[in-house]
Amino acid sequence: MKIEQLIEQIQKKQSFLCIGLDTDLDKIPAHLLSEEDPIFAFNKAIIEATHHLCVAYKPNTAFYEAYGIKGWSALEKTINYLNENYPEIFTIADAKRGDIGNTSTRYAKAFFEELGFDSVTVAPYMGKDSVEPFLAFENKHTILLALTSNQGAYDYQTNMVDGIELYKKVLQVSQAYQNSKNLMYVVGATKASYLADIRKIIPNSFLLVPGVGAQGGSLKEVCHFGMNKQIGLLVNSSRGIIYASNTIDFAKEATVKAEELQQQMAEELQSMR
Amino acid sequence: MKIEQLIEQIQKKQSFLCIGLDTDLDKIPAHLLSEEDPIFAFNKAIIEATHHLCVAYKPNTAFYEAYGIKGWSALEKTINYLNENYPEIFTIADAKRGDIGNTSTRYAKAFFEELGFDSVTVAPYMGKDSVEPFLAFENKHTILLALTSNQGAYDYQTNMVDGIELYKKVLQVSQAYQNSKNLMYVVGATKASYLADIRKIIPNSFLLVPGVGAQGGSLKEVCHFGMNKQIGLLVNSSRGIIYASNTIDFAKEATVKAEELQQQMAEELQSMR
């Protein structure tokens, strides 16, 4: 997907909501467990209930891999369902991959070609030749981890290197990678005030912002510090929406929660004009 | 697997060779392509030809994911084959995973429980709460990326933080993680001279050393700087062994190449006494 299509969708839906499909058999409504593929049945119901309110879906691969082949199959069905029914929606494989050159190319093929995602999250630790293979794919997007939303982010990401924090160096250095126009970045909402500094380094890039809601981040702050002329934000919510209820009404409750966030986003988009 | 069992196997086989199963349909012998599962057929033949010469196998998950469900199924068959026929062999899922706490637990379950690997490689960027969930599994091993064998290693890993290189900080900080006894580390052989410094920080940990052979590292140097009282080394070779030939004789040629390395390793083990 071209970035312009994503921006157009954001304007049209008045939403920059990404919904995380972290589907867990221990948390989905019990009545779905008798389905042939409960994971896919759940995802499909969530998608049907929320696709008009969000612009992106983000399955986290860990939740699928934990169920082996059955899980991988559910992931494949989910991305196929999205691509067939809602091709305008941006899809993110939250996989946090990264390896030496020829191996990263394999991961890129897995997510961009074999599964058909628009984007994949990638870890920066192995440097340039572990990231550039992902960037070589046209109209596909590589979402590099910069500043994550967990406590462990302070272990290394905020360490000072060459006079700046490591995550800022990741932003700077990666901007010089070949095809860096295909880069987006993960920046946790729990550290929203950091966004002002981040925008000085990467004014134009899209940011994927996890951690709003369950992890405590504020949408207002994220918008205040992180929004740019092209919006430049995808704000993710997972558990707050998909597990809003675990009864027969789970999809309806997911709509309610997604709508709440979409409304807040619409207000932010209006006030930004 | 307990670490003592790995050491016992090294002594018995006089080898600390790990064979990387980076199985690529474009590189395996053409006659295997008509098999029902060419990837597994290749892996099985390589395992049969080399299991007496090595102590570990390391499938890189990227190569399997690139083929979707078929690939994941071949990975499952491979690990099942190893666990059923050669339970004494140490198995490594080279997956370079890592995510926030509850998600890392999912990855750990995927590789340790669902697939049944003895170990998995993990990226350090997200810090403590992304690594400790892996360490919580008893008799399972978490192989943390420290200093990788690629050029991009110099992008961040060798940056100075708090007066030491980032990869050394990763070694130090991770040693304080809960259950750090379950940690091993990836240290590239192309940087063998770094091993002396590394051993000052982690004298007792096992190191997984890629980059001998195809990537240019020297086995002699790795042993000189990296070996400890418990050997403490797993030296990996992938392409040099599994793609030694792509004719009908590929398995025989793999035996020859694995034997060459095993012989060199036996010499190093002898000279160390």
Image (cartoon, coloured by chain):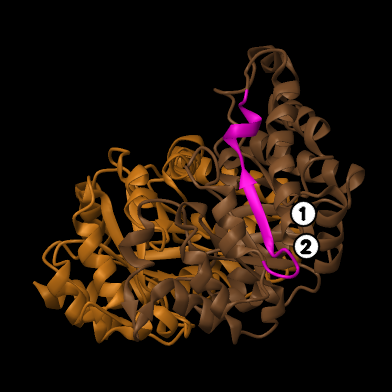
Chain colours: A brown, B orange
The residue identified by callout 2 is A273
Does residue A238 show up magenta in the picture? yes
- Splitting the image into 4 quarters, where does residue B69 fall? top right
- Splitting the image into 4 quarters, where does residue B201 fall? bottom left
Asked whether residue A63 is in view, the answer is yes
State the image coordinates of residue A143 (x, y, percent, origin top left): 62, 64
Q: Nearer the viewer, residue B46 or A208?
A: A208
The residue identified by callout 1 is A270
Q: Is residue B104 left or right of residue B74?
A: left
Residue displayed at 60% across by 46% down: A61
| SS class, disc 2 | loop
Instruction: Residue lying at the far left in this picture: please name it.
Output: B273
Residue B17 sits above or below residue B56 on the image: below
**Highlighted magenta segment, given as a residue range:** A228-244
- Splitting the image into 4 quarters, where does residue A203 fall? bottom right
Residue contact at pointers 2 and 1, CB within 8 angstroms: yes
Does residue B156 show up magenta in the picture? no
Residue displayed at 40% across by 74% down: A166
Q: Is residue A267 left or right of residue B48?
A: right
Q: Nearer the viewer, residue A110 or B163?
A: B163
State the image coordinates of residue B156 (x, y, percent, origin top left): 40, 79
